[in-house]
């Protein structure tokens, strides 16, 4: 899975390419691949942001306060990029073009969720299951050992 900072880096590079293309007078259709890369990076960032807010069990023990502040700053940067892209598309092609971009972006996010994010969820669930099982087995072994030594101390074994 991609981390939020890598997603922002990918989005920033795609955004800079979009800005260069726009300033060079390229049509948005010519830059559709770059726009798709930006949308994918934006989607990855949102997914990673959700994962930081609601981490899997095995990541709950880490300190997320610094990460949360960094993600907040990166989120503002992503929102500014999105607004600039929206303004350009709406200004050049009209507000209905932005609505079409949003529909395409939603479809891309749905497909990405079915493919990449589901795989990551399965990995996280597997790790959670293994860690939970290990913790359960260790706790069970501790209880059995405790009862054994208690019985031995009382002279029952």
Image (cartoon, rainbow, N blue to C red):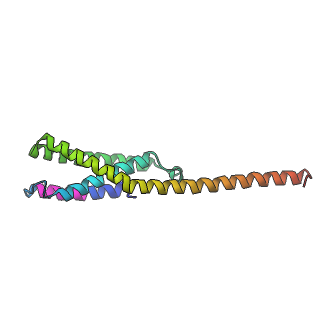
Residue at left offset 34%, top offset 58%: 6
Quadrant (top left, top right, bottom left, bottom right) of the N terminus: bottom left
Task: Name which residue lies at 48% across and 57% down.
Answer: 123
> Disc count in the image?
0
Q: In this view, which residue lies farthest toward the top? A: 95
**Magenta segment:** 12-22
> Which residue: 31% across, 50% down?
109
In-image side of 110 versus 61 (left or right):
left
Is residue 29 visible from the viewing direction of this image? Answer: yes
- Which percent across, then down, holds residue 75? 32, 47
Q: Is residue 57 left or right of residue 46?
A: right
Quadrant, the C terminus: bottom right
User: Is 147 inside the magenta-drawn segment?
Assistant: no
* Magenta span contains residue 17: yes
Residue with the most extreme left position:
25
Q: Residue at x 25, y 55 (%)?
A: 38
> Where does residue 51 sit, x and y in percent of width and height?
43, 49
Q: Name the foreground residue: 109 vs 59.
A: 109
Please tell me whether the stretch drawn in magenta is mainly helix, strand or loop: helix
Query: Residue 100's spot in the image, x, y percent?
Result: 19, 45
Q: Which residue is the extreme one toward the right?
A: 155
The answer to whether any part of residue 70 appears in the image is no
């Amino acid at each position: 899975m991609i981390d939020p900072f890598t997603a922002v880096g990918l989005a920033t590079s795609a955004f800079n390419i979009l800005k260069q293309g726009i300033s060079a007078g390229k049509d948005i259709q010519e830059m559709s691949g770059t726009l798709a890369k930006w949308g994918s990076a934006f989607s990855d960032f949102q997914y990673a942001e959700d994962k930081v807010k609601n981490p899997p069990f095995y990541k709950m023990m880490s300190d997320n306060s610094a990460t949360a502040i960094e993600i907040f700053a990166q989120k503002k940067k992503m929102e500014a990029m999105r607004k600039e892209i929206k303004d350009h598309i709406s200004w050049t092609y009209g507000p209905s073009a932005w609505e079409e971009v949003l529909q395409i972006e939603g479809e891309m996010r749905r497909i990405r969720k079915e493919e990449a994010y589901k795989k990551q969820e399965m990995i996280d669930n597997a790790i959670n299951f293994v860690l939970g099982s290990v913790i359960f087995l260790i706790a069970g072994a501790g209880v059995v050992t405790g009862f054994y030594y208690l019985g031995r101390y009382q002279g029952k074994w």
